[in-house]
Image (spheres, rainbow, N blue to C red):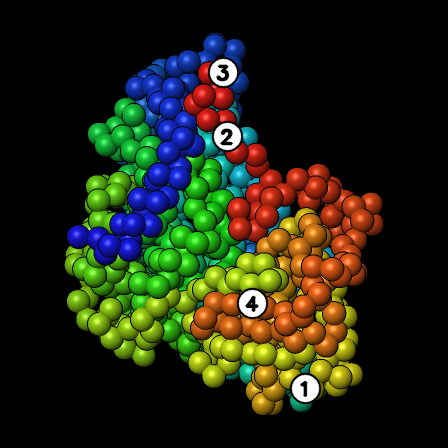
Amino acid sequence: MPHHQIDAVTARITERSRESRSAYLARIAQQVDLRPARARLGCANLAHGFAAAAPDEKQALRRFGKPNIAIISSYNDLLSAHKPFERYPALLKRGVVEAGGLAQFAGGVPAMCDGITQGRPGMELSLFSRDVIAMSTAIALSHEMFDGALLLGVCDKIVPGLLIGALSFGHLPTVLVPAGPMTSGLPNGEKARVREQYAQGLVDRAALLEAEAASYHGEGTCTFYGTANSNQMLMEVMGLHLPGSTFVNPGTELRDALTAAAARRIVDLTPVGHDYTPIGHVVDERAVVNGAVALLATGGSTNHTIHLVAIAAAAGIRLTWDDLDDLSTVVPLLTRIYPNGTADVNHFHAAGGTAFLVRELLDAGLLHEDVRTVAGPGLRRYTDEPALRDGALQWAPGTPHSHDPDVLRPVAQAFARDGGLKVLRGNLGRAVSKVSAVAPKHRVVTAPARVFDDQADFLATYRTGNLDRDFVAVLRYQGPSANGMPELHSLAPALGALQGQGHQVALVTDGRLSGASGKFPAAIHVTPEAAMGGPLAKVRDGDLVTVDSITGTLTVHVDDLDLRDATGGAPAVDQWVGTGRELFAGLRANVGPADEGATTFVPAPSLEEQYA
């Protein structure tokens, strides 16, 4: 039986979402057709749809006996995580055909790398790229040629964008197909140490580059547990990957076998298959709660306090930060993966991985078992692990014991009794804090504010030595409406070094930090943001600020906050230019707050509004 708090939060979400979810499901029902979708097209439309197909495919598309599967990929050979997708379309097409279907490459979506753009102007497009990817996915599926979809994506904004786009076509079965992490290179802790040494001027650029290149060294996802790997964890626990497929390295026989299995499975899930399972029914309130629980139990990326809210909204589900906070009180921390520990995701996978994690959470009543998944009904099947036996892909029960209790533990021996994320509240607004990577002695900081409106100003001040003291860095005008809410991970080496020197430091910002950040306390995603009149705009140098992730408070200790005028400001829209930023001014002008998913999409109409 589910834990009473899991049931209570799920019931609250269900009740809050009753109208919007009902309207969403009604739209799905209107789109369902047991015939292949292309049967509804006129002859000229259909002829355009198969004009470039091979002769045998063209004949099959002319008839209406076989389902046609869309392949949508975020492939490029710039991103290590997405390079493996170069081979996938051919593998997937072959698997679909073997299962009795047809497949077409429906479209590509952009995929940018936050690792490349950290601290650069391009980072200000990063969050908005999620909604661009969602729209690109919708464009690819809009041709009404398809009965199911295979989505190829891994990294930060890409998977949420693909999923949001696919949920607009909630009647279509959809399987997300992962690529897996790169093999382990230079340990993440050693890489972080070199970064801090470089920030302090103790090593030169050549030493830093050597460390970075030894860490990021081949195809696959970066091995730390940031947003990309949190994405993958959530997709599996929400039932959108095949069981055990998330953390299998690229270029292996097992990886290829799982990719082919995803292609075969999607055919069964179509309306003309044997197990029709539309994505809009997979992503329901219980699946969203399961995703949130997995995020908390693993100390996952803070970015998902934004993305999961936006994903849920795309399915007509209203998830709030209060829901995440209440879940965090009963969900224990079961993993130590960098930046919450020294191990990487390959070590986590070897220790027992997702199958062990799901079993522990199910047995403790912390996950909903009665869900629909792309593998079939019930989440219990995600306690199985895939393996090749005599060349055949098979699933068998995963390990009942962790192979490394320093990395992965059972609920009874959890690293912490509550989850890795916490919502902070106070007279500065609401914020999110990732506490799983912060040592207990650093979880409460009260110190004078040093106020900055630009991360470059912070770094320049740090280099002068004028921050060698206790302080709370207040970095404002970094929210969605101000400049696209860039990640501020470039601050991490400096703040980490100052903390290591014995200073009490913390960060308060309406921007994002990074799924890879940890160690020092940070209150991020502060809402309302400074650019929209939030109290962060009224903080001044020297004001005493408390960041307390134990009691969940975020406070500036002044009596006249309401009477003060705002200072500083975000760049005007017509000054937000260069690196393509001017093209995104419309998104910046229409984006919502972080606690509502920082989305540029307006809510879908209710049933009453649809039929008014």
Q: Is residue 141 left or right of residue 66?
A: right
Q: Residues within 10 Å of mark 3 (few under 14, many from 20)?
A: few
Q: Residues within 10 Å of mark 4 (few under 14, many from 20)?
A: many
- Residue type at the position of mark 2: Ala
On the image, the x and y values in percent for residue 451 come to 73, 70
First reached walking from the N terminus: tag 4 or tag 1:
1
Q: Are marks 1 and 3 in contact (CB under 8 Å)?
A: no
Q: Quadrant of residue 404?
A: bottom left
Residue assigned mark 2:
604
Q: Is residue 194 visible?
A: no
Residue at (19, 66) in percent of width and height: 399
Query: Disc 4 versus disc 1: distance between alpha carbons?
Result: 20 Å
First reached walking from the N terminus: tag 3 or tag 2:
2
Q: Is residue 161 left or right of residue 295?
A: right
- Residue type at the position of mark 1: Arg
Q: Is residue 205 above or below residue 296?
A: below
Residue assigned mark 1:
469
Query: Disc 4 versus disc 2: distance between alpha carbons?
Result: 34 Å
- Residue type at the position of mark 3: Ala
Of discs 1 and 3, which sits in the foreground? 3
Q: Quadrant of residue 354?
A: bottom left
Can you tell which mark lies on residue 612?
3
